[in-house]
Amino acid sequence: MIRDDQIVFFLGIPGSGWAKIDSLLRCCKKFKFNESDINENTIWERNTNKYYLNHKGHFLGPGSGVGEGFKDIGANYTRESFLEECLKVYTDINDTDNYMIKCHWFCERHNINWLIRNFPNSKYIAVLRDVELCNHRWLESMTFAKDYPNYSAWMVKEDPDEEFGKHCIENEQNFKRLNRQHDSELRSFVRRYADIIFCPTKYVLDRMGFEWDEKGHHEFTWYKRCYISDNNLYTRAPKYETSIAFYNCNGIIF
Amino acid sequence: MPDLFDERQLIFFCAVPGSGWAKLSLLLGCCSKLNLNKSDRRPEWEEVGKTGDTKHIFHKGCFWDPMREYGDGFDDIGANYTKEEFIQECLRPFKEHDDKNYLIRSHFFAETKNLDWLVDNFPNNRIIFVLREPGPCFEGWNTGMTFTKHYPNYKAWMKYTFIDDHPENYQRLWELINRHDAMIRNWILDRDCYIIQSNKAFLNKLGYVWDEEGIEEYQKMLHTHQFHRVETPRYDAPFVFYNCNDFFEVSS
């Protein structure tokens, strides 16, 4: 059985670029994330003119096949059955690796409170980004039901003709409403609990043992390209508009 | 002439107008690890801005920049000062001189040539920036400040200094905010920097002193910065720390 301190709950709203941050953190030796959740069914990418998306590994929550009851964890699971559900996506369980558990619905206030109560010794990582930027990024580059991961839990209406950048207005409005709610509840959690909040610069990643092999260079290059300033004539430097908040992760950086 | 015990006593602080840097610098003034000299503070250098709310003084102490009493040549430091002259210009507004650190605040440090000059001449000194998107900065500056009617003046950002609110002054301010924001971001890109948001836990790492002044400055930062028109913190203006590792306990 794995220990609670091997569990890393990963929180972020759709469009925050959390999948990219996930990929960066997976390159950091100090986290030593188990990657047995990555297989041919859990790798997906899209390169639009504006955004590059690269989703790897599991995404838990309603519509994904695992974590169907995660809209209200406390009502649907015991501590043990929840942990069992989370670890279903991993094929290799050992007592040395850390296990990232990633779900947008953890951002619900009642879920965050349940997690903190039941897993006080686990690590928590939250990705913060302005909600309007998140909405734009996601709505311009993803679909609710045709891409990986599945976002049908954000839908209120069937939309067989949807394409990325083209969604029915009801689903779009519901998506924005949920993103506003989850962003607000996530920020409240961060305000209350975060030990440190920083932007993932090269230097900080080095401090976390980032491996600058081919994979590491690839991930960091795409991170920079995703967050490059595209409306500023003067610079091609990153905007640093995404922050990562850490709780219970002492010793990883400082 | 005052002298430094150690060149590292000079901490350079830089951001674009409207970034909230002045409020954030007051937070740094409450951090024991920064050990800042505050003898540049005096009543005539306090400003509440357009709101007129005397409970919210957000400018305290000296600001160095062109067309001001101090730092008039800071648009091109290398061309206008020798290293010794520059040190004296930094120290001039302080009334007391001891082993405390001096926080030297200038928007024009952002010029690439100035940042490079600072690092060439003070390779071991700390530099702290505040990053914030130009749009919110421009709006923030307009909410609280004017070019000449509040402290400090922003004459160096004006195109026509004889009319405070001439539209082209705002255009020039916008252009300079963008120019300096880009220069800062490009400069820090490949340098060893931490970009960190100023939450309570982090301030505690810097030895924040929660006395009357500390509580007041923190509340001001919350109300006028992180929670401005929103219910949850924005976290849109992080500090950037260069050469500041001794402030943190860095694990090997």
Image (spheres, coloured by chain):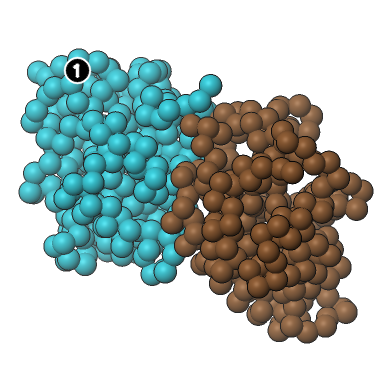
Chain colours: A brown, B cyan
Quick check: A50 above or below B229?
above
Q: Could you say which quadrant of the image residue A134 lies in?
A: bottom right
Q: Could you say which quadrant of the image residue A113 lies in?
A: bottom right
Q: Front-most of B96 and A209?
A: A209
The N terminus of chain A - image quarter: top right
Q: Front-most of A127 and B43?
A: A127
Q: Could you say which quadrant of the image residue A69 lies in?
A: bottom right
**Residue under numbered circle 1:** B4
In-image side of B177 versus A29 (left or right): left
Which residue corresponds to the image point at 86% horizontal and 45% vertical from the top-left?
A91
Which residue corresponds to the image point at 70% horizontal and 52% vertical from the top-left?
A101
- Image coords of residue B63 (percent x, y): 22, 41
Which residue corresponds to the image point at 34% horizontal and 41% vertical from the top-left?
B204
Which residue corresponds to the image point at 60% horizontal and 65% vertical from the top-left?
A111
In-image side of B99 versus A252 (left or right): left
Q: Chain of mark 1?
A: B
